[in-house]
Amino acid sequence: MRLSTAVKFIIFAHTSYCYVPSVLCKKGGMGDDTTTTTMVGGSNNERMLASSSSKGYNYHRNYIAIIEPRNFVSLFPNGGGIVDTLIDSEKTQVQGSSTILNGKIYDPADIAIVNRFNGVDENDITDEVIGKVSAVFGGEPATIQDVLSISGGVPFAGGRQPKQPIPPGDSAFFYHGLCVATSAFDLTVSSHSCKLNICLGGGGFNCIAFYAGTSFVFNLEPQVGFFPFEEAEPSLPPPFPATIIGGTGSFEGIEGTMDIATICGTTGPIFILDPRPTRDLSQEEEEEVRRPIDDNGNRRLQIDTLGDIKLGLIVQTISINSNMPLPIAP
C-alpha cells in the first residue's frame, strides 16, 4: 500500500488562549522584578495571575520548559482515548483523565519563539517521525514527502514554535509531573489537580515540588474532531497558578508560588486511517451486523486507525516567586 493513498484525518486534542507572551531578557536577567514580559498585540497584564504580582517573596525567576510530544501523554480512566471520543462520546470520561509530562528546563534567554503560521514543513520532519510512519505502513520505507503528504501545513497550537536548533540543556534541570481533570461537563474541563516538580541542578536532586488545584476551564470539543481538509489552528490551555509545597537538596524549606502558562503547542495527533479495499455489498452487510449497538439501537461507527503522529513541541513558561535564591538554567 502506497503512503500517498492513505486516508488521513487530523485530530486536534488537548492543546490556551490566543495570547502568546514574548519574553524579552538577557542571560541571567530573570532573577528580579526588572524582568520584562510583553504580549503580541496587547498589555502584559492581561494574562497575569494573582501570584505573579505577589510581593511577599524576595526572589523571582522565570524558566522555559520544553516538552516533546512523546513525553506528554493523556490517559482516560476507562482506557478510552481521543478516537473513542469521536466514535462514542459516552465511552470516554473526561473527568478523571490524566496527563503525564516530562520536559527539559532552559533559561528564557536561550530559547527564541518564532511565528509558524504556515504550520508543519519539512524542517519539522524528524527521523523518528519518518520511522513511525514507515512502521504504520508495515515497514514500507517512508520519505519526508510521504510524511508531508499526511501532515504538511497542519497548524501548531498557538501558531508558534521554538526556533531550532534547541540547545541540549542540562540533564540536572528538568520538569515532570501529573495533572488530573477533577471535574468536567461533557468535553469541558472545569477544574484540575496537578502535582509537579521542577529540578534545578544538584545532579537532579535540587527540586521544588508544587501543587495546583484550581479552576481550569478548557473546552476540549473544539479541539477534537475530524478535519480532512480544514486547517483550523488548535488553541492552547489556560494558564494556572500553583503553590510550592516543599523542596529537596538546596531547596529544603522553600516556600512560594508559581505560574505556569503554555505558550506553544503541537499539531495534536494526526491519525492515519486504514484505507480498506473496496468490498462487495454482502461484505458490507455482514460487517454492519457485527457492529456494536448503542443505547438508541444504532450501529456504532467503526474506525480503523493504522497509527498516529504528532509534530511540534510544547513550550511552557514557569514563573517562580520564592523565599530562596533560584539558579539560572544553563
Image (cartoon, grey):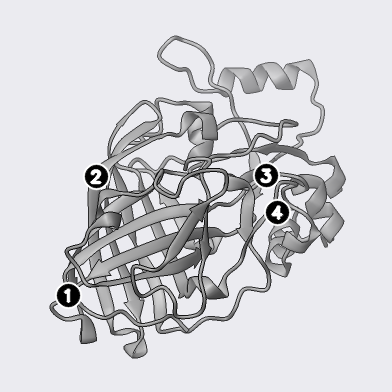
Looking at the image, is 187 positioned above or below residue 137?
above
Front-lying residue, 31 or 280: 31
Graded by Cα atoms within 10 Å as few (under 14), some (14 to 19) or many (20 or more), the crowding at tag 2 reads some
Is label 4 in contact with label 3 (beta carbons under 8 Å)?
Answer: no
Cα–Cα gap, marks 4 and 3: 22 Å
Element assignment for label 3: loop
Q: What is the spatial separation of the Cα atoms under label 4 and label 1, in whole angstroms? A: 48 Å
Q: Is residue 67 above or below residue 281?
A: below
323 w.r.t. 16: above or below = below
Residue at position x 66%, y 66% in the image: 163
- Circle 1: element type: loop
Outermost residue to the bottom: 203
Q: Are marks 2 and 3 in contact (CB under 8 Å)?
A: no
> Does the CB distance between marks 1 and 3 fall below 8 Å?
no
Query: Left or right of 123: which side holds 225?
Result: left
Q: Which residue is mark 1?
A: 254
| Above or below, 204 relative to 175 | below
